Image (tube, helix red, strand yellow):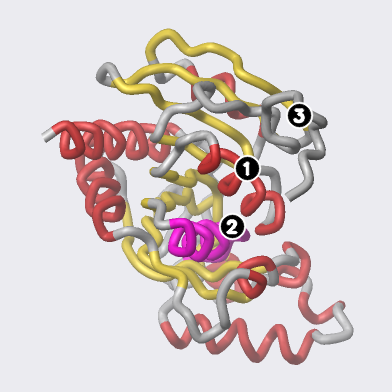
Amino acid sequence: MVDYTEGAGYQYHTHVAPGDVGRYVILTGDPGRCESISKLLDNPKFVAYNREYNCYTGYLDGEKVSVISHGIGGASTAICIEELAKCGADTFIRMGTSGGMQDDVIGGDIVIASGAIRAEGTSKEYAPIEYPAVASFEVVNALVEGAKKVGASYHVGVAQCKDSFFGQHEPETKPVGPELLYKWDAWIKCGALCSEMESSTLFIVGSYLRLRTGAVLLVVANQERAKKGLSNPQVHEMDKVYGTTIEAIRRLIASDKA
């Protein structure tokens, strides 16, 4: 592959170099969250900020842990994972937001994704559509234990991933609206818990690169509850998601050391 940095020594998009990041990585969509998340670590240091990629590295239980944003959607997420893997990272946990799809998935709950529906485009450039997008069993278990530790109301199951936010929320306005509505109904009937935009790419790229992956998602609200006239609280506070992730990484660190 051509070195587009012309010998600068760092990855082209993230501006991260070997030694800058730990093997454990916390992924988040919003670059603005990275500094606050990094404060959950010991001795956090700013690494780089380029495009949608804002990176900090600190320590947790003596092990180097990094936080980096990946922007919105699968394409930028795949670049982030690929470039950090080249720099030595092997464990990635995405923490982000989602919309509930089942009636019992309420704003303020968290979803630990055991797998994801590949209704986005990026993962199709890595694996045939028949290949499932699944999280690492070890990471899912660690996230469940983390959720219990922080007292979160959590669900474990399948997340639906798409490329178009407004295709989900305003499908009837789109030229392919009937197809979107048909599939959305199918995902719900199949038991999908929530909808977001990156986990399927994370799981597929992780499978290909032999990385450990997981995702923990805040349910901001639930449009299906709103349609039925049920209470639909909106929650934006991420503390339980942050706490779940940190506790999960602690467990993975302890297990790896053992």
State the extent of the magenta-drawn residues as a range. 194-209
Query: In terms of depth relative to the viewer, which is nearer, 108 or 60?
Result: 60
User: Residue 60: percent from the left, percent from the top?
Assistant: 32, 21
Q: Is residue 202 magenta?
A: yes
Instruction: State whether the magenta stretch is mostly helix, strand or loop.
Output: helix
CA separation in Å, label 3 and label 1:
14 Å
Q: Secondary structure at mark 3?
A: strand
User: Residue 125: percent from the left, percent from the top?
Assistant: 66, 71
**Vertical comparison of 218 with 205: above or below:** above
Q: Secondary structure at mark 1?
A: loop
Which residue has dot 3 on it? 50
| Badge 2 vs badge 1, beta-carbon distance below 8 Å | yes
Question: Which label was assigned to residue 198?
Answer: 2
User: Residue 169: percent from the left, percent from the top?
Assistant: 72, 68
Which residue has dot 1 on it? 29
Residue neighbourhood size for the residue with mark 3, other residues' Cα within 10 Å, grouped as few (<14), some (14–19), many (≥20)? few
